[in-house]
Amino acid sequence: MWWLVAAVGLGIPLVVTAMPEFGMLAVGAVAGAVTAGLGGGTVMQFIVFAAVSVALIAVVRPIANRHRSQRPQLASGIDALKGRSATVLERVDAAGGRVKLGGEVWSARALDADQVYEPGQKVDVVEIEGATAAVKQEAEPVVVRAHR
């Protein structure tokens, strides 16, 4: 019974502080309670508690930290538009123009001030500034040819 009280007691700081280590210790306390329920002695209960807690901290904590430090894999919003291809609808130069990007019409400007893009031309979106897409000439596909 004391192990379950300890598990609940460790669960409270887990919720309050969002420190996953408390949850791992709470799982260790539950394992100690299971050991007690199966008739294990006090020493065995503490050994199981310590082993389960240390194992969880040693294995789960590095995995959780690695996932926490990674940026999201799925880009959304403006970030999802960067690098996409657009079609010029109205002449685009340094002063402005219009492109079709992701099924929508966007204001656009040429990234390089001396570049001009004509309707129908494909361009790549480099960045989004407010409601304006900064574009450059679409990159040519890389062709690799094998030499004999």
Image (cartoon, helix red, strand yellow):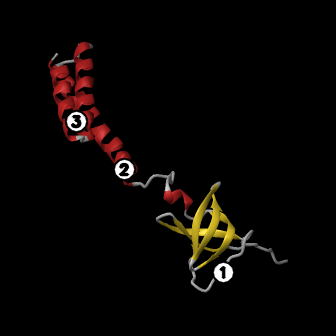
Q: State if disc 1 and disc 3 touch (CB < 8 Å).
A: no
Where in the figure is residue 26, as x and y percent of width and height?
23, 30
Q: Please name whichever residue, 101 or 8, is drawn nearer the observer in this view of the structure.
A: 101
Q: Quadrant of the N terminus?
A: top left
Within 10 Å of the Cα at label 1, are there few (<14), some (14-19), or many (20+) other Cα atoms? Answer: some
Mark-to-mark CA distance, 3 and 2: 17 Å
Q: What residue would you read off at disc 1?
A: 116
Measured Cα–Cα span from mark 3 to mark 1: 58 Å
Callout 3: 10 Å neighbours few (<14), some, many (20+)? some
Q: Which residue is at the far bottom? A: 114
Badge 1 amino acid: Val
Can you say which quadrant of the picture contains the C terminus? bottom right
Residue 68: numbered disc: 2
Residues 43 and 117: in front is: 117
Q: Dot 3 corresponds to which residue?
A: 14
What secondary structure is found at the residue carrying circle 2? helix
Alpha-carbon span between mark 1 and mark 2: 43 Å
